[in-house]
Image (tube, rainbow, N blue to C red):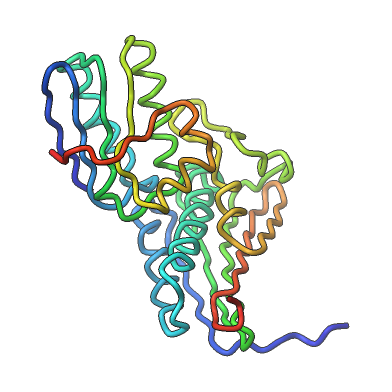
Amino acid sequence: MRKKEIPVNYFKAEFPSNSVNESFSRGICASFLASLDPTVSDLCDIRTAVSEAVTNSIVHGYGDAYGVVYITGETFSDGRVVIRIKDKGCGIANVKEAMKPLFTTDKSGDRAGMGFAIMKAFSDRLKVTSRPGKGTTVTIIKNVGKNGR
Amino acid sequence: MNVKCEIKDKILYVSLTGEIDHHSAVGIRNDIDREIYKHAPKCVILELSGVDFMDSSGLGLILGRYSKLSALGADLKIADPSPKTEEILRLAGIDRMIPIEKGVKRV
């Protein structure tokens, strides 16, 4: 078994699934990464991917009902950043289908169904694990440190 | 988020400033739709140079206005997105449906 790698730095946060916290979640991730001296583009990519994942938890996971969104960030010595966004919401029955561009469960026509496509495009690796009725965890991995460029 | 609108010769100019996410999109949508119904423009120009963050909620907002305007027989154009916003628009293929123009004046 591979030894668990110890992060150089990490944070853990949680907040209620209020849409006002979408902006807060982007802000804490950006602040957390500031010490790595990331490029403006890398920072924007992470902010966007985090915003998509948190919005999914709020809109889909909890369906605009009350819930808690958990977020953790880790940085590693090779410049890798790992951000995990977790909810204990309704989960996704078919992750593969949900990740297809333009897939949306929204009926109003105001959701583009591009959340996962954007998360995928803006991260170096994206992992989604979900169990219906239990919740969803999205892991965003991006190389932003000097070694990652 | 700030929404500024100006109507001139049946063209509705909408300048957005700030961040477009799921939280702010509802207010922006209501503001734009109110102006559309008030003025019945033949074209809406969505000026995005002041937008410093946009995620897929912005795509939903734009696509929603596009179908609304199409139903009303009006056009939608996007003006001056930041490079990152343009990347997201192109990723979703919006540039193939809605023209993206450069150098449009802000209102």
Q: Is residue A120 above or below residue B12?
A: below
Residue at point 45%, 51% (across, down): A66
User: What percent of the width, then of the height, locates residue B20?
Assistant: 34, 47
Q: Quadrant of the C terminus of chain A?
A: bottom right
User: What percent of the width, then of the height, locates residue A63?
Assistant: 51, 42
Q: Is residue B20 above or below residue A29?
A: above
Residue at point 28%, 34% (across, down): B46
Residue at point 47%, 33% (across, down): B94
Question: On the rendered structure, is B73 left or right of A130?
Answer: left
User: What percent of the width, then of the height, locates residue A139?
Assistant: 63, 64
- Please tell me how many numbered marks the rendered image carries: 0
Question: On the rendered structure, is A89 left or right of B39?
Answer: right
Q: Is residue A16 above or below residue A80?
A: above
Name the quadrant containing residue B73.
Answer: top left
Depth check: A74 or B8 in front?
B8
Depth check: A125 or A107 in front?
A125
> Farthest residue toward the front?
B103
Q: Is residue B66 above or below residue A17?
A: above
User: What percent of the width, then of the height, locates residue B100?
Assistant: 37, 35
Residue at point 60%, 48% (across, down): A116
Q: Quadrant of the N terminus of chain A?
A: bottom right
Depth check: B100 or B39 in front?
B100
Name the quadrant containing residue B33.
Answer: top left
Question: On the rendered structure, is A70 left or right of A43?
Answer: right
